[in-house]
Amino acid sequence: MLHYCFILPGLEIKFGIHFGLLFFNIIHRRRRS
């Protein structure tokens, strides 16, 4: 169980940045068109 305490924060940061960039690109494309 302690294992997850260290892994989850790292995954949340990775996915948070990944999805953040995806949404940023989608909004940026819609503004142009």
Image (cartoon, grey):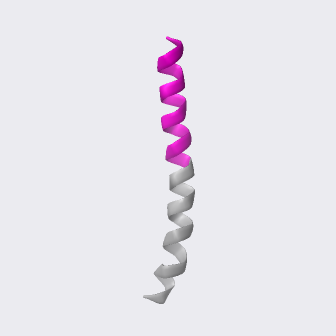
Estimate the x, y position of residue 18 in percent, counting from the top left.
55, 48
- Can you name the residue that lies furthest to the left here? 1
Q: Residue at x 53, y 75 (%)?
A: 7
The quadrant of the image that shows the N terminus is: bottom left
Q: Quadrant of residue 28?
A: top right
Using the image, determine if residue 30 lies above or below residue 10. Answer: above
Which segment did they paint magenta? 18-33
* Residue 20, magenta (yes or no): yes
Q: Quadrant of residue 13?
A: bottom right
Q: How far across and down, in percent of the image, does residue 17 sit?
A: 56, 50
Q: Residue at x 51, y 53 (%)?
A: 16
Residue 1's place in the image compared with 16, above or below, is: below
Total of numbered circles in the picture?
Answer: 0
**Type of secondary structure dominating the magenta stretch:** helix
Residue at the front extreme, as displayed = 31
Q: Residue at x 48, y 27 (%)?
A: 27
Residue in the picture at 57% in, 57% down: 14
Quadrant housing residue 32: top right
Q: Is residue 15 magenta?
A: no
17 to 24, vertically: above or below: below
31 up-or-down from 6: above or below:
above
- Residue 4 image position (x, y, % from top left): 47, 80
Name of the residue lying farthest toward the bottom: 2
